[in-house]
Image: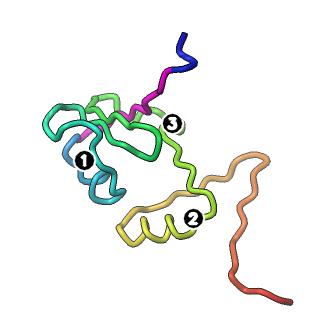
Amino acid sequence: MLATKDGVATVAVRNLNAAKKFYEGTLGLKRADSPEPEPPVYQAGKFRLLVYESKYAGTNQATAVTWDVGSDLEKVVQGLKAKGVVFEQYDLPEMTRRATSTKRGG
């Protein structure tokens, strides 16, 4: 029934105005709907992202949205850090973090 229908990632936020600044200004997403209707829907690649205000925002301790950036990961991270985004790292069972290096040769 839903296998051929497009899904929309949905993210709850505590402050809709602050969220709009982040999604539009920091991440550079464009609205997929007209500027006035709330909640806003953003286009992100081939999927849409619905952002709505909720007093329960921030209570989900799981991944809400994932972007596949492929080999552009370092470039995207550096660009977001330059805009003030802070990245957190967590130690998870059976997962190892690796530092990347641009040095070649031995």
Give the residue pinned by disc 2. Answer: 72
Q: Earlier in the sequence, mark 1 or mark 3?
A: 1
Q: Earlier in the sequence, mark 2 or mark 3?
A: 3
Give the residue pinned by disc 1. Answer: 20
* Separation of residues labelled 2 and 3 (CA atoms): 26 Å
Between marks 1 and 3 in the image, the one whose residue lies nearer the viewer: 1
Q: Quadrant of residue 51?
A: top left
Give the residue pinned by disc 3. Answer: 61
Residue at image coords 28%, 32%: 52
Image height check: is 7 above or below 106?
above
Quadrant location of the C terminus?
Answer: bottom right
Amino acid, disc 2: Asp
Helix, strand or loop for disc 3: loop
Residue 92, x across and y down, in percent: 70, 48
Residue 41, x across and y down, in percent: 30, 36
Helix, strand or loop for disc 1: helix
Q: Residue furthest right?
A: 106
Residue at image coords 50%, 65%: 77
Q: Residues within 10 Å of mark 2 (few under 14, many from 20)?
A: few
Amino acid, disc 1: Lys
